[in-house]
């Protein structure tokens, strides 16, 4: 039975959709993503035009890995003009990219770009995704469709392939190619790179994610940002499950979620950038100053005024601690996205 058939069998009650949608958002924040899917679907059964529930369901599909359902739901939302078009578009093309449908990403974003400009807050991310998808689509076209052993390329020097490319999108294309290989053929080179001082921290994170996705049950040695340690890929938690993310995101949520939801999303994006850079190690800073600095950076990137004294008071920290953390962040800022 389709979602639409399920929705038609529900007797609507006034206010039910709002209540269920709010409960869905809470479950999504708390990490019970499957329950969030159920609650958002239930909300839409009471009111199939409920924008908050529709967008919540889209996010829940993405969070639970239901990429195909999510992309199809996003298409329906855009057809019906449900919710913020560009917010939905951003999730939609991200899902398509994860599905490997790079040509569709390119066609979609080029069509939108031809009609109107991307919003400033999303422009950089959408342009990066467009360029990456163009490269990935071209790479797929160049593959020999008659080569049945294309997924096994043991003779490729993957370390050299990653080193010789300077553009991030090209490195991502190589990583995508590595993902298609047999894990036992690529794992040794990944282990070597995880302890290579010349390998960028973010690239090490993505390589570690490959081992995690492959469920590698073997300890690997990681050296990153003057830190060393041995980790079992299968036991590594998601970024969102780390103590730093939980604590700092809660501080940011208390400050921004109701007052400025868009700024809150941008702040969470900045927090994930930092944690991805350090992963699987936590950043060596206190939580409150980190939250205050991320808040300030989100304001700055949105073109809004930053009141340092207000932020220090709001997060109950000393101005000295804010300045020290800000100085550390500024040193790292240009490196956070380097592959």
Image (cartoon, rainbow, N blue to C red):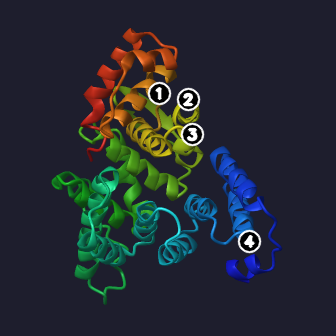
| Residue 186 spot, x, y in % from top left | 38, 59
Q: Residue at x 39, y 26 (%)?
A: 293
- Label 3 secondary element: loop
Among numbered discs 2 and 3, the one appearing first in the sequence: 2
Among numbered discs 3 and 1, the one appearing first in the sequence: 3
Q: Which residue is mark 3?
A: 258
Among numbered discs 4 and 3, the one appearing first in the sequence: 4
Q: Residue at x 52, y 76 (%)?
A: 80
Q: Is residue 286 visible?
A: no
Q: Residue furthest bottom?
A: 146
Q: Residue at x 51, y 57 (%)?
A: 213
Disc 3 or disc 1, which is closer to the eye?
3
Q: CA distance from mark 4 to mark 3?
A: 26 Å
Q: Which residue is mark 4?
A: 45
Among numbered discs 4 and 1, the one appearing first in the sequence: 4
| Residue 326 spot, x, y in % from top left | 33, 22
Q: Which residue is mark 1?
A: 291
- Label 2 secondary element: helix
């Amino acid at each position: 039975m389709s979602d639409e058939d399920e929705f038609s069998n529900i007797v609507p009650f006034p206010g039910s959709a709002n209540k269920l949608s709010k409960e869905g958002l809470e479950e999504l924040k708390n990490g019970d993503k499957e329950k969030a899917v159920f609650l958002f679907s239930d909300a839409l059964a009471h009111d199939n035009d409920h924008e908050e529930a529709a967008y919540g369901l889209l996010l829940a599909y993405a969070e639970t890995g239901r990429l195909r359902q999510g992309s199809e739901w996003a298409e329906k939302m855009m057809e019906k003009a449900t919710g913020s078009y560009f917010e939905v578009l951003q999730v939609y093309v991200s899902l398509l990219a994860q599905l490997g449908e790079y040509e569709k990403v390119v066609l979609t974003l080029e069509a939108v770009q031809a009609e109107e400009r991307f919003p400033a807050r999303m422009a950089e991310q959408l342009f990066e995704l467009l360029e990456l998808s163009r490269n990935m689509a071209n790479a797929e076209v160049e593959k020999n469709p008659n080569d049945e052993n294309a997924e096994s390329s043991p003779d490729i020097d993957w370390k050299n392939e990653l080193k010789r490319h300077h553009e991030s999108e090209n490195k991502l294309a190589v990583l995508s190619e590595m993902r298609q290989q047999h894990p036992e053929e690529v794992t040794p080179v990944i282990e070597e790179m995880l302890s290579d001082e010349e390998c960028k921290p973010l690239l090490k994170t993505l390589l570690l994610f490959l081992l995690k996705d492959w469920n590698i049950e073997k300890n690997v040695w990681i050296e990153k940002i003057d830190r060393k340690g041995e980790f079992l890929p299968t036991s590594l938690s998601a970024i969102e499950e780390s103590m730093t993310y939980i604590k700092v995101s809660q501080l940011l949520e208390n400050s921004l979620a109701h007052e400025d939801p868009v700024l809150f999303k941008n702040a969470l994006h900045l927090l994930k950038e930092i944690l991805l850079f350090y992963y699987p190690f936590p950043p060596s800073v206190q939580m409150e100053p980190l939250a205050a600095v991320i808040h300030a950076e989100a304001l700055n990137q949105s073109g809004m005024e930053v009141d340092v004294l207000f932020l220090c008071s709001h997060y109950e920290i000393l101005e000295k601690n804010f300045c020290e953390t800000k100085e550390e962040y500024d040193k790292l800022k240009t490196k956070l996205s380097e592959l």
